[in-house]
């Protein structure tokens, strides 16, 4: 929210206590205002996937995995229909999702290399299910940061990279 808008709200009598809440909400709304399909990650430490786009709909899954990649496949108002790595689909409120790119390791063991090539030294080895922040992808490799440890991992060993419209 820009400063001029905040001043206008103050002039109209909006209490100061509401401004931080409005700023926080507008950031997630703008960040997720894209055309599907696209990639996002779970923003919170706890996120609920529901059967439909409403808090009245039954919860299907509860995630405790900040940074887990989700493929957004549809939008209805403030709700996003998402797909996770195993193909499960459901609905999450936009405030639970971040535009930050992330990836999940899908191979049993995936070497994270110093450079984006198969002959480069192995810096780390990531196990299936490891989640990290996704960086640049090129030459069949993607840069992945897992808790401050980064390396280049084969693109076919992760989920969350590439064209979201082509994901399974």
Image (cartoon, grey):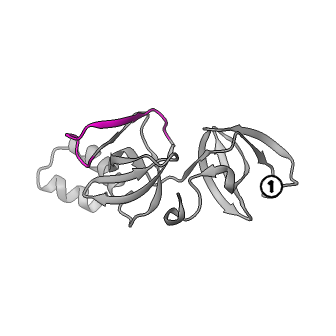
Q: Is residue 74 above or below residue 50?
A: below
**Does any portion of residue 106 appear in the rendered image?**
yes
Image quadrant in which you'd find residue 116: bottom right
Q: Position of residue 69 (x, y in %)?
A: 51, 48
Q: Position of residue 94 (x, y in %)?
A: 33, 50
Residue 55 lies in the magenta-colored region: yes
**Residue in view at x 24 percent, y 55 percent:** 6
Q: Is residue 115 above or below residue 163?
A: above
Q: Check disc 1: other Cα within 10 Å, few if <14, some if 14-19, many if 20+.
A: some
- The residue at which mark 1 appears reads as 115
Q: How many marks?
A: 1
Left or right side of 72 for 161: right
Q: Is residue 41 above or below residue 76?
A: above
Left or right side of 138 for 75: left
Left or right side of 1 for 7: left
Left or right side of 63 for 120: right
Q: Position of residue 114 (x, y in %)?
A: 81, 50
**Residue in view at x 27 percent, y 44 percent:** 21
**Does any portion of residue 2 appear in the rendered image?**
no
Considering the whole magenta stretch, tell me its main secondary structure. Answer: loop
What element does badge 1 sit on?
Answer: loop
- Quarter of the N terminus within the rendering: bottom left
Q: Position of residue 71 (x, y in %)?
A: 46, 54
Q: Is residue 56 above or below residue 91?
A: above
**Residue in view at x 21 percent, y 43 percent:** 18
Residue 62 lies in the magenta-colored region: yes
Q: Which residues are magenta?
A: 52-66
Which one is nearer the viewer's eye here, 7 or 142?
A: 142
Which one is nearer the viewer's eye here, 151 or 63?
A: 63
Image quadrant in which you'd find residue 124: top right
């Amino acid at each position: 929210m820009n400063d001029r808008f905040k001043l206008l709200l103050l002039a109209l009598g909006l209490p100061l206590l509401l401004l931080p809440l409005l700023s926080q909400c507008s950031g997630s709304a703008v960040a997720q205002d894209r055309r599907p399909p696209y990639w996002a990650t779970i923003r919170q430490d706890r996120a609920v996937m529901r059967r439909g786009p409403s808090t009245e709909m039954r919860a299907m899954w509860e995630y405790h995995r900040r940074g887990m990649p989700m493929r957004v496949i549809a939008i209805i108002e403030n709700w996003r229909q998402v797909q996770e790595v195993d193909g499960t689909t459901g609905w999450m409120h936009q405030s639970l999702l971040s535009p930050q790119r992330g990836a999940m390791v899908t191979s049993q063991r995936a070497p994270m290399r110093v450079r984006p090539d198969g002959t480069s030294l192995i810096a780390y080895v990531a196990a299936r299910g490891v989640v990290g922040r996704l960086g640049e992808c090129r030459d069949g490799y993607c840069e992945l940061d897992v808790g401050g440890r980064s390396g280049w991992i084969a693109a076919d060993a992760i989920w969350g990279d590439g064209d979201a419209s082509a994901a399974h």
